[in-house]
Amino acid sequence: MNLAGLRADQAPPISAPLRFFLTAPLFAIFAGFLIFISDPSSLMSRFSPETIAITHAITIGFLGFTMLGAMTQMLPVLAGVKIYKVKFVSLFSYTLLVIGLIFMLFGLYFSKHTMSALGVISLSIGFLTLLLPMISALRSVDNFSSTVKAIAVSIGFALMSVVLGAILLSAYATGSFSSMHTILANIHSVWAIFGFAGILIIGVAFQVLPMFYVAPRFKQFCKKRVVLFISSGLILWALANLFFVGYAILAKIWIGLFFWAFSTTVWIKLNRRRRPISDVTVWYWRASAIYMTLGLFAWVIDSAVEDKYIVIVSVLIGGGFILSIMSGMLYKIIPFLVWFHLNAKGYMNIPTMSEMIDKKFAKIQFILYQISIIGFIFSYPYPDLLQYSVLVFVLSMIILEYNIINPVLIYVRTIRTKPDFDMSSFNMEPNS
Amino acid sequence: MSTIKEYLTNDHRRCDEIFASMEDAASNSLEDAKSITQEFIDASEHHFQMEERVMFAEFEQKTGMTEGPTAMMRQEHTQMRSLMKQLMDSLEAGDKDRFFGSSETLMILLQQHNMKEEQMLYTMAQQHLSADSDRIIAMMDSLIVE
């Protein structure tokens, strides 16, 4: 039996997840800046280099960073496994991902092939540096709970998305596009969104909704089968796109049905939760359930018009569903980590989690973010709205960064003072 | 008779139920929440002592691991005790924000603590202590909180 998660010295240092979390809104702000300087007409197409750059500032920069940061923290607690040399691996991976993403964004946006090439190399190594040790750690899990299974499947899709992404970006770096480019791009994006992010969210929801909100537990059928049904749907969808295009819509409906069921279940479970508190994280879960439902219908119906409105679908699912849940999660996990690490170091007189983030600012951030998402959707028929929506979006991300940096500043300030209860006296090593 | 794992896991669920009722009561009136808060603290203390004085002690004796997982779990019990004291203090002071601030922190700490115990430590304890399972459960059942 592996007991890594039960030992404080083997849990990841607080810097490993925080580094990823604090960077996430910065890339979203940068995405906002890119939208602001872009011509709205070029953003109507999914395949313009500008759109691809902006999308990845969000999907890798915000969503990817948040998920990787969260997984360094979750694997020891939920699966009881230790990521090999987690401190070094997460710092190394983080550095390469930041550099690689910046190269990729500039390379695509300004058509600089060398930068795109450097982006491919740096991002690929950055992702693999963290994903491979996670896969290796998961091999030693004895007791695969439904959440840990979902995390494992999600990492599998992450790995495939990274490989496909590297192939696609290489095409931009070399300027030679294969006849398969569009199909691979579709598989890459759908697997990354529904396979990597979607399945991870479902798996984590199995634990988090009952745990944070005392909502009713998910049914065994749901916990045991849903991830299998969705992942088989995703594989069938990819195969259909490659060989039987006419049938792809069936796999799409299949995937959509399960995510729709999930969104509805989240909504119902929150209604039946036993915790009376309704905070910004509950609103984010609810908002995400609505956006996901709308997004799925839009995705399926969009097939009838040859994916003409895929940008709206991406805003609903990527921004409305995934980014909402991740933002809500940041509001919970960062104050908890700060509290937990300080308390474990012997600091007893510290603010509680809810005192670390100003509720008023969290509320303002949530409202601004909702306005920006609705604004982005209506920018499609009314392009003049785009400039205003993006300003509201950037403002919401600046406030998000401010809100989540506050607990970290509390940590930094507190750690410089003397603990109330000196834990170092338990350490027999001199000068440590 | 149930296994050690089932017995202690069920007790976690019992404490969770009281916790939810406590927050429910406190959202209406802090004054009314005093008795149920005390009930929650007593139930948790009883659970902690069943582990610390019986199960952990047996586990440590059997495996020789005194600085391992049980030490970590004992430390988290200490963290939770200090939060429970804060709950009581905020009830006395009539400070609702402070109460829910402490209860939220306690809730998450408690849940991730329970998860680690249920998924790892209890499974491991069951493997090492299965021969003495009935005796250990009987001891935990008859424990009087000190």
Image (cartoon, rainbow, N blue to C red):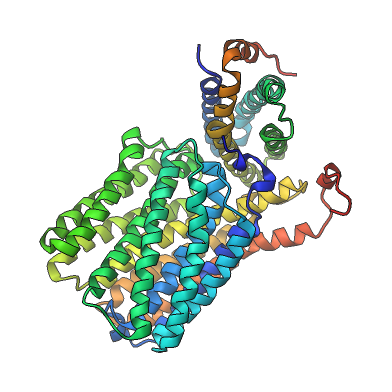
Q: Position of residue A219 (x, y in %)?
A: 35, 34
Name the residue rendered at 15%, 59% in the picture. Answer: A249
Question: Of B110 and A271, which appears nearest the observer?
Answer: B110
Q: Position of residue A230 (x, y in %)?
A: 28, 49
The residue furthest left is A246
Q: Position of residue A89 (x, y in %)?
A: 59, 61
For the C terminus of chain B, the image quarter is top right
The residue furthest right is A430
Question: Along the horizontal axis of the image, is A182 left or right of A387?
Answer: left
Name the residue rendered at 48%, 65% in the picture. Answer: A127
- In this orientation, does residue B25 appear? no
Q: How many marks?
A: 0
- In this orientation, does residue A362 appear? yes
- Vertical placement of residue B65 versus A201, above or below: above
Question: Of A59 and A96, which appears nearest the observer?
Answer: A96
Name the residue rendered at 75%, 48% in the picture. Answer: A345
Question: Along the horizontal axis of the image, is A161 left or right of B138?
Answer: left
Question: Of A60 and A138, which appears nearest the observer?
Answer: A138
- Vertical placement of residue B72 versus A370, above or below: above
Q: Position of residue B14 (x, y in %)?
A: 53, 25
- Vertical placement of residue A235 versus B143, above or below: below
